[in-house]
Amino acid sequence: MSRSFRRPASQAGFTVVELLMAIVVLATAAAGIFAFERAIVQSNARSNDLTAATAIADFWMERARTEATLWRNNPVAELGDAAQTPLLAPLAQPAFLLVAGNTTGWLDIPPLIPGSPRLNRHLEPWTAASPPTTDVGEFCSQYRLTTLAPGPTALVRIEVRVLWYKVGAPRSAGLDVCPSAGMFAPTGDPNLETAHTLQVASTLWSNAR
């Protein structure tokens, strides 16, 4: 004959071990929820940065296409005014378009208006007086021109790349300088440990008539 033992009513409740186990389970669940929430916030931030970088790259690529409408037969004369065609002005060098494969190398994108600040993530002018933790120099844009088909009406490849620091990455001094030294490895390539990079490319042709 078996007997079941029950606690007296005065002793009903949880033991210390049960309470500790419940606390551990709740703490583990809470830590998982917080980690998941943090991952979502970081993912959203990266997505927003990528969207901003894409918008900036598209802005400059469209600017290059607009400048190319002025290029018809004589780039030395038509693209020689850097105030009118700041991106395509290097094409005005007499020898540049004569040899396939000639490249400018990566160049700093000039400001829209000479002497004015460049653009930040909101496509607004950088504010040099901003604290270093804000948008000053956070998104840096560069471009490169390469001759694909030589001649007065050459086919030119244009590449635009945008760089910005990763969250928590060490940043060099002078964040208002574009590009910031901390964005690049000793080889001269973007430092993928400290910075994200986005690159787009297109081709430009003379609007010869």
Image: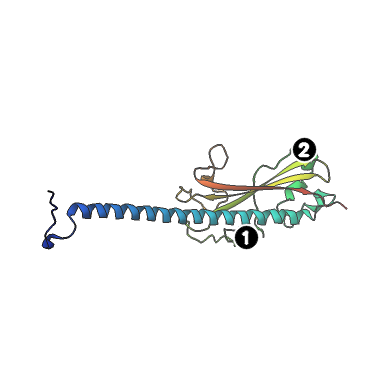
Q: Which mark is residue 187?
A: none
**Residue drawn at x 26%, y 55% as measured from the top left:** 23
Pick the front one: 159 or 99: 159
Q: The residue tagged with tag 1: helix, strand or loop?
A: loop
Residue linked to disc 1: 116
Q: Which residue is mark 2?
A: 100
Q: Position of residue 92 (x, y in %)?
A: 77, 48
Q: Residue at x 77, y 38 (%)?
A: 100
Most foreground residue, 37 or 42: 37
What amino acid does circle 2 point to?
A: Ala
The way the protein has been coloured in the rendering is rainbow
Q: Residue furthest front?
A: 1
**Label 2 crowding class (10 Å Cα cut-off): few <14, some 14-19, many 20+?**
some
Q: Nearer the viewer, mark 2 or mark 1?
A: 2
Q: CA distance from mark 2 to mark 1?
A: 34 Å
Residue drawn at the location 70% of the way across and 56% of the way down: 62
Viewer-proximal residue among 107 and 59:
59
**Tag 1: amino acid:** Ser
Q: Is residue 162 visible?
A: yes
In screen coordinates, is 135 left or right of 36? right
For label 1, the crowd category at 10 Å Cα-Cα, with few meaning under 14, some 14 to 19 and many 20 or more, is few
Q: Position of residue 164 (x, y in %)?
A: 54, 51
Front-most of residues 64 and 180? 64
Vertical side of 167 occupied by 193: above or below:
above
Query: Who comes first in sequence, dot 2 or dot 1?
Result: 2
Question: Going 81% across and 50% down the picture, which residue do you hit?
Answer: 206
Query: For the image shown, how many numbered marks are present on the structure?
Result: 2
Q: Is residue 81 visible?
A: no
SS under mark 2: loop
In the rendering, at what x and y percent does residue 148 appear? Answer: 76, 41
Name the side, left or right, on which 141 lies relative to 80. left
Q: Point out residue 49 in the picture as x, y percentages from the top left corner.
A: 54, 55
